Amino acid sequence: AQSVTQLDSQVPVFEEAPVELRCNYSSSVSVYLFWYVQYPNQGLQLLLKYLSGSTLVKGINGFEAEFNKSQTSFHLRKPSVHISDTAEYFCAGGRTGGFKTIFGAGTRLFVKA
Amino acid sequence: GAGVSQTPSNKVTEKGKYVELRCDPISGHTALYWYRQSLGQGPEFLIYFQGTGAADDSGLPNDRFFAVRPEGSVSTLKIQRTERGDSAVYLCASSPDLGGGEETQYFGPGTRLLVL
């Protein structure tokens, strides 16, 4: 069975500091992976996605993620965060060619001034 | 253009009652998903429609849950004999083509269901 695990439920960080939000997946088959963000009182929106090819994926708002097949990870990074990055971040994925997307439990990023 | 809309935004009902939750996808989007998000959890897949048909309904928790999309656009999630454990935010998402789960999903704001 596939699963997506976000290793941190909350990540507090100071403004302009770098951040990494960790995500591990379990699957024995080819996968696709996403990071979605949910700002307060808004719907989920896509940050970036990995389907195949280059393992370093760049997304919106300066975020990037690296697909690591050997470690089954897809960690999200940003070199310098802003107050406006405060939100809930969800890692999600599924089997290539499938329809069912599995979401992690979410990581709440809290950027402090 | 207009995004995915869901109505009502909030629904309070009593245990045992029947509820319907509506989703209007982005115009022209052929794929539609329903998810359930409980407090402190990520969205949990319920069902996926390709056009009018449910291509994958493996996430529906039991036979009290049913979803339809009769004309391939608007979808309704129906819950019979509601239970307190059904309380959650129900999310709808749509995507533009039939590429499966790999396609970007555009989410609505959700319907917050509270069963008393």
Image: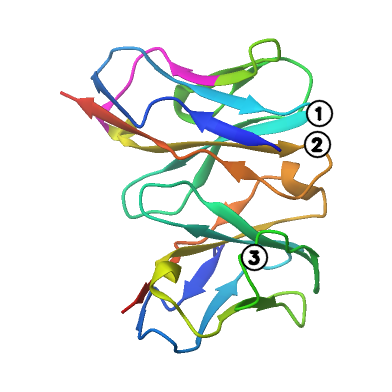
Query: Looking at the image, is mark 2 or mark 3 nearer the viewer?
Result: 3
Q: Which residue is mark 2?
A: A96
Tag 3: amino acid: Leu
Q: Tell me if residue B74 can be seen.
A: no
Q: Crowding near pointer 3: few (<14 within 10 Å), some, many (20+)?
A: some
Tag 2: amino acid: Thr
Q: Whole-Å distance between the Cαs marked 1 and 2?
A: 8 Å
Q: Position of residue A47 (x, y in %)?
A: 53, 34
Residue at 61 percent across and 65 percent down: it is B61
B58 is higher (above) or lower (below) than B11: above
Query: Looking at the image, is mark 1 or mark 2 nearer the viewer?
Result: 1
**SS at mark 2 in the image:** loop
Q: Crowding near pointer 1: few (<14 within 10 Å), some, many (20+)?
A: few
Q: Quadrant of the N terminus of chain B?
A: bottom right
Same chain under badges 2 and 3? The reply is no
Q: Crowding near pointer 2: few (<14 within 10 Å), some, many (20+)?
A: some
Q: Which residue is mark 1?
A: A29
A14 is higher (above) or lower (below) than A34: above
On what subunit does the disc labeled 3 rest?
B
Q: Position of residue A112 (x, y in %)?
A: 18, 25
Q: Are marks 1 and 3 in contact (CB under 8 Å)?
A: no
Q: Whole-Å distance between the Cαs marked 1 and 3?
A: 24 Å
Q: Which residue is mark 3?
A: B60
Residue at 35 percent across and 12 percent down: it is A18
Q: Are marks 1 and 2 in contact (CB under 8 Å)?
A: yes
Q: Which residues are magenta?
A: A75-83
The question of residue A82 being in magenta is answered with yes
**SS at mark 3 in the image:** loop
